[in-house]
Structure formats: C-alpha cells, structure tokens
Image: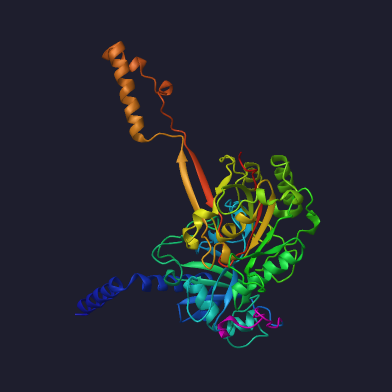
C-alpha cells in the first residue's frame, strides 16, 4: 500500500512539473542560481517583475532641480521624465551581450568607429514607451533591499532605494522582463561579443547619467549655446510672406553659417556638448582610439576639404547669379557630426577612410534639388528638412555650415543603429558539385575511364571554384531621438 501511495505522489509531482510554464521554470532556475552564486542578494527580490537588484552606486543627492533638469530628484516621482542611461548586458556566465561603453567594446573585440558610444535616451514617465521592461521597472519603482544586505553593503542607508541621477544598479532579470522569446536583438555596434538566447535570464548594469523634463527644450538650448560661440551663425528665415512693417519669421533651432571656411576656422575655438554627461561646454566625444584628440580630427577635416576644394568662393563673390535656389540642382559634399564632435557620416572617401577605416566606397557628390521636395512630408523628402530649407540659400562654389535641432533632422524617433553582415568571394556547394562534375567529365572524355583516377587531382582543381570567403560587417550609426546635427558643406560650382 505504501508503495502505491508513493508512486501516486511521484506521478502527481511529475504532472505538476510538466504542467509548469516555461516562465515559471525559468524563475525557479534564476532563484536557484541566485542562491548559489549571489546569496547576499536573495533578499533584494522584487515582486513586481520577479528580478533581483544589486546597488552599485546610490546616486547624487545634492544636485538641485533647475529649469529643465531634474537634478537629484528620484525618477519615479516625475510624471514626465526623459532619462539618459549607460547600459551593459551580460548572460549569467558573464558574456557581454550589449554595451554602450567603447572601452568594454574594445576589450570584447566589437569596437566600431561607426558606433556612437554614448548613453541611451528614452522616455521614462508613467507609461513605458520603449524601455526594456526590467530597466523601466527599476527606474519607476522603489526597490526593496533586504535588511542584511543594507547592513552589510550600505550601513548608513535605510528603507527602499529609488533610482536618480548618478545611481547605478545591477539587475538579475528573467527573460520575461528582458529579451523574452526573441533573445537579444541589439545592433549598431552595441551587440557585445555574444548574443543572448531566447527565454534566457540576463544581468544588466544601468547607470543614470541625467534626467530632463523635455528633450526638445534641451536640444534647443544646446544648439543656441553652440552657435553663440561663433558670431557668424544666423537663424534661417522661413518662406512665409511678411507684410510690410512685420518682422521676418525664422525657423526655431535651425542656423546657417555662410562664412564657415576650413582655411580660416579657428580650431582652438571649437566647443562641444555631451548633454548626456552634464550641461558644461567643451565636452568632446571620447573613445579609446580615434577621438582621444578632437583637434586632430578637426585638422583632418580641414586638410581634406582644402585639398579637394581649394577654390571655394569668398563672401564677396556670393552674388545673386550664384544663388542655388529651389529650382537648381546642387552637388553637395558634406561631413555630418553630432554636437559632441563625433562624425557619423560623410560622402568624402578620404574622410570615410580616416573616420571609419572604410575603403569600400567611392566619393559621389549628393545631388539635391529642393523643388523636388515641395509639398512633401518630412519622411517623404529625399533630404532632411534642414537641407530643404538651407541648400536653396547657398551659393554655388561656397563652403557653409548648418546646425539643426532634430525637428529638421531625424526627430523624435531618430534612427536605430543596424549591423549587416555579408559574405563574398566563395562559391556555394552547388558550384562545387557542378565544377567537380565538369572535371570528372574532362578526365573521362580525354583520358578514358581507366586513367580517371590518375589524372584527377583535387589540389589542382581550380576551374573558377574557390572555398575562400570574405565576411564584411557594415554598421549604420545610431541617431538617438532629439539629437541635433552639424553639417560642414561644400557646393560645387554650377555646371555651364
């Protein structure tokens, strides 16, 4: 009888295990992993989301909220909040599956000159509109910390933990609040060395760099302070008709510099913004390689521009007969940069080689006729709004510069970074078999079946078949939402 009862209990246990969902099994596995590897964090379990938290930095507490900036105020207490965060993701065995840090990318062999390694910006208000669920939950909730953990790691702290500027946490998350059934799909050079499998727990480091109320106000402030440093920037006038006596109307956040010239540019006067870090000036983009010295980047741009286009016209030669207007086609050479100095695009091959180690493209001028974009929405135009409004105001044969908020560029969505890998140079197995059959036929026809094996030599079999392949990875640079851009331009002289 006891044997029967034991058998029944065992069978019911098996049925219970088999009926357990994948998410429940994963939660149990993560809990067991935590007990084995991170026992001191077991008390930091978060019921909402089913994850564990480790506090690496409590955060700033003495930065006052001012204007658009929340300072040290907790993120969860804000109705509307945009947050800049640094993130690095790992599998449970420590393999990096995403990072926005150039040094870590270099250590993992994934560093790319096309990747803009800066904190991510996203809405973090009352509704999650795009953040990874675990990241959102950690920033929008008071996090429970066990009494033993607090006493050991943060003895001068009490109560729950709230994320704020300067806070850094490490989350141990089930896939239900991470990358779920798809696994990690990060691209654009932020992938890390390994991808994360579907339905797999992960570890995520999150550091809050800054939080603001309105990113539009922030980028407008950055642009206006950027152009204030050099007196030659002018607001771009709209095409609206103005009644006599009325003031002209201008595009907000769009500036044009007709007097930019690399020959006379003061390289030491270049100033930059990294809004993700602080509100100060001269915060150039930094990585461990190309942008260690921003002045050398400026010198390279100057060198290439002057070598390619030495005969640019002077301001006194910018006469009405040289004006591009909407009706004419302008052939434009450009360098596109973020306000921190990072070069994200150019159609000049010498600069592509210098900036991205890209030797695959030939220089081609961008041909643009603003008339073709009349009466079109921003997403239908062949060029961004800044070009639509500025190029007709340029002169054939001149240098110029444009700075614009995202309203005339890539807007509230930005452009996601992407990674494309292609293979070339090798042949398929179908090609292999086709060429082998041809070689067999050659031996049989000319030498007879009996001599076939004597004349068949695999090593000399090279009738157009090659097993060697070349793998090429192309990365398109991410443009974050609400990101201003700077363009240096040269417009070719008008064709006769």
Q: Is residue 307 above or below residue 444?
A: below
Residue 150 position by quadrant? bottom right
What percent of the width, then of the height, locates residue 301? 71, 48
Quadrant housing the C terminus: top right
Residues 335 and 418: in front is 335
Residue 348 position by quadrant? top right
What percent of the width, then of the height, locates residue 106? 62, 53
Is residue 318 among what the camera can see? yes
Residues 338 and 490: in front is 490
What percent of the width, then of the height, locates residue 189? 55, 55
What percent of the width, then of the height, locates residue 289? 69, 51
Residues 342 and 491: in front is 491
Residue furthest to the top: 447
Q: Main SS of the magenta segment? A: loop
Residues rendered magenta in the picture = 63-78
Q: Residue at x 57, y 52 (%)?
A: 110
Residue 160 position by quadrant? bottom right
Q: Is residue 334 above or below residue 376?
A: above
Residue furthest to the bottom: 159
Q: Is residue 491 above or below residue 43?
A: above
Q: Residue at x 70, y 43 (%)?
A: 304
Q: Does the magenta stretch include residue 77?
A: yes
């Amino acid at each position: 009888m006891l044997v029967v009862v034991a058998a029944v209990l065992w069978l019911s246990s098996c049925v219970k295990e088999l009926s357990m969902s994948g998410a429940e099994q994963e939660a149990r596995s993560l809990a067991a992993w935590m007990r084995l590897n991170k026992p001191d964090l077991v008390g930091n379990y978060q019921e909402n989301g089913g994850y564990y938290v480790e506090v690496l930095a409590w955060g700033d507490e003495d930065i006052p909220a001012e204007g658009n900036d929340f300072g040290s105020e907790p993120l969860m207490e804000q109705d509307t909040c945009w947050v800049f965060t640094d993130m690095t993701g790992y599998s449970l065995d420590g393999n990096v599956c995403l990072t926005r840090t150039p040094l870590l990318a270099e250590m993992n062999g994934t560093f790319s000159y096309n990747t803009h390694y800066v904190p991510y910006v996203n809405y973090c208000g009352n509704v999650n509109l795009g953040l990874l669920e675990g990241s959102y939950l950690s920033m929008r909730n008071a996090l429970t910390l066990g009494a033993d953990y607090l006493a050991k790691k943060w003895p001068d702290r009490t109560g729950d933990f709230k994320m704020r500027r300067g806070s850094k946490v490490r989350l141990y998350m089930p896939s239900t609040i991470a990358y779920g059934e798809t696994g990690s799909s990060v691209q654009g050079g932020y992938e890390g060395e390994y991808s994360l499998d579907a339905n797999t727990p992960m570890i995520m480091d999150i550091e809050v760099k800054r939080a603001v109320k309105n990113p539009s106000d922030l980028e407008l402030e950055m642009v206006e302070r950027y152009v204030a440093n050099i007196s030659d920037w002018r607001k771009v006038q709209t095409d609206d008709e103005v009644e006599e006596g009325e003031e002209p109307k201008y595009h907000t956040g769009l500036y044009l510099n007709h007097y930019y010239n690399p020959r006379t540019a003061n390289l030491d006067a270049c100033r930059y913004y990294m809004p993700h870090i602080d509100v100060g000036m001269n915060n150039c983009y930094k990585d461990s390689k190309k942008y260690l010295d921003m002045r050398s980047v400026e010198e390279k741009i100057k060198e290439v521009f002057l070598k390619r286009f030495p005969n640019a016209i002077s301001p006194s030669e910018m006469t009405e007969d040289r004006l591009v207007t909407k009706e004419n086609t302008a052939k434009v050479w450009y360098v596109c940069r973020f306000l921190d100095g990072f070069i994200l695009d150019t159609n000049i091959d010498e600069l592509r080689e210098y900036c991205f180690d890209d030797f695959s493209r030939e220089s081609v001028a961008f041909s643009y006729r603003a008339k073709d974009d009349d009466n079109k929405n921003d997403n239908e135009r062949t060029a961004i709004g800044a070009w639509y409004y500025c190029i007709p105001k340029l002169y054939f044969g001149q240098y110029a510069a444009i700075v614009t908020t995202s309203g005339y560029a890539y807007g509230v969505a930005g452009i996601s970074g992407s990674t494309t890998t292609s293979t070339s140079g090798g042949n398929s197995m179908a090609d292999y078999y086709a060429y082998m059959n041809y070689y067999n036929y050659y031996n049989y026809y000319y030498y007879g079946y009996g001599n076939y094996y004597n004349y068949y030599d695999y090593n000399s079999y090279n009738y157009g078949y090659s097993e060697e392949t070349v793998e090429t990875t192309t990365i398109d640079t991410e443009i974050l939402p609400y990101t201003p851009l700077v363009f240096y331009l040269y417009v070719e002289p008008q064709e006769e």
